[in-house]
Amino acid sequence: MPKYQIRLINSEFDSTEESDYHSIVAASKEGIRTAARVAADRLEDGMTSEAIEIRISEGDRIVARHVVSLSVSNLDADA
């Protein structure tokens, strides 16, 4: 049975999750959830935008890629 791994990448980090997933769909869903949490945390730390690439691999072969992108715009002219 194939096993899939998640790798999160942006300009400041490159992280591979140690867990194995038994389907591309399960790995993709978890990768997207994790990337969204990481991006949200970084926005809370003062960033105004964040993009994280998710790579799903089976061994050395990349089988799926996604990008999570979040941004915050202050609409208050006085802030």
Image (tube, rainbow, N blue to C red):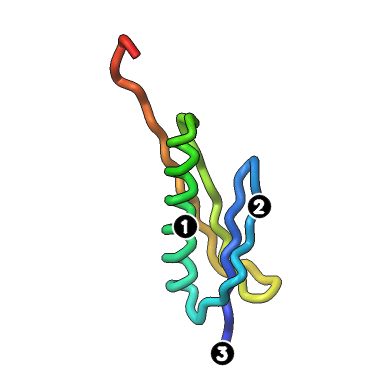
Q: Amino acid at mark 3?
A: Met
Viewport quadrant of the C terminus? top left
Residue 49, horizontal then vertical, whole percent: 47, 34
31 in relation to 47, above or below: below
- Mark 3 or 2, which is nearer the eye? 2
Name of the residue lying farthest toward the top = 78
Q: Earlier in the sequence, mark 3 or mark 2?
A: 3
The residue carrying mark 3 is 1
Judged from this view, the residue extending furthest toward the front is 45
Q: Tell me the kind of residue under disc 1.
A: Thr
Q: Residue furthest bottom?
A: 1
- Residue tagged 1: 34
Q: CA distance from mark 1 to mark 3?
A: 24 Å
* Callouts 1 and 3 close, C-beta under 8 Å: no
The secondary element bearing badge 1 is classed as: helix
Who comes first in sequence, dot 1 or dot 2?
A: 2
Q: Which residue is mark 2?
A: 14
Quadrant of res 8: bottom right
The image quadrant of residue 61 is: bottom right
Between marks 1 and 2, how big is the CA–CA gap?
13 Å
Residue at figure coordinates x 56%, y 89% from the top left? 1
Q: Is residue 32 above or below residue 27?
A: above
Q: What residue is drawn where x is 49% and y is 61%?
A: 31
